[in-house]
Amino acid sequence: MTSEPAAGKPDWPEPAGGLQRFYLGCPEPSWLRGEGVGWLDGSQGLALFVCHRRLARLRTLPRAGLPWACDSGGFTELRAAGYWRVSAADYTRAVARYDREIGLLEWAAPMDWLCEPGIRARTGLSTREHQHRTVGNYLLLPAGAVAAVLRGLVPVHAGHPRLVH
């Protein structure tokens, strides 16, 4: 992804002291500008996680003033429809547009098929099929631009499943 900063904004360094970057879920795409969120300092290991579903509605995208990642919106998409209503090609084009027009995009989430029991009940598919479709979608997206994710359920004590990523 590009590391081009918005005009007049610094290119954020990697977090100091070996910190991992923490991505904060962001309900408002305008926060990407970095205005009014002074507490969010990219050099402190914080960045924004903004949903594709929110960005896709915008005709004019905000220019980023701080690092961010794009959430595919998979949970909402699968919960609402039981399938992906956007194609991998359309999602890829949207992510490329966000990278080009917003800037400072560090990575994008894949179009994964979540394995939570409620989501599987909605889709009517098995965990294995969700994993198969997640890998299939991942292989359709551009290499290096999308984070690899594979989810599943493993049994734990007392018969209660535990979600693993």
Image (cartoon, rainbow, N blue to C red):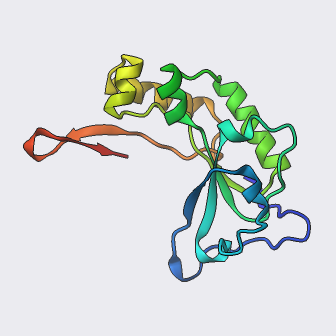
**Could you tell me which residue is drawn at 70 percent across and 34 percent down?**
92
Q: Position of residue 90 (x, y in %)?
A: 72, 27
**Could you tell me which residue is drawn at 60 percent across and 77 percent down?**
44
Q: In the rendered view, does 84 fall on the left or right side of 153?
A: right
Q: In the rendered view, does 156 fall on the left or right side of 62?
A: left
In this view, the residue farthest toward the top is 124
Q: Which sits in the foreground, 116 or 39?
A: 39
In this view, the residue farthest toward the right is 7
Marks counted in the figure total 0
Position of 70 relative to 31 (above/below): above
**Could you tell me which residue is drawn at 65 percent across and 46 percent down?**
145
Q: Position of residue 99 (x, y in %)?
A: 77, 48
Q: Position of residue 136 (x, y in %)?
A: 51, 26
Q: Which sits in the foreground, 67 or 133?
A: 67
The quarter holding residue 9 reads: bottom right
Position of 144 relative to 106 (above/below): above
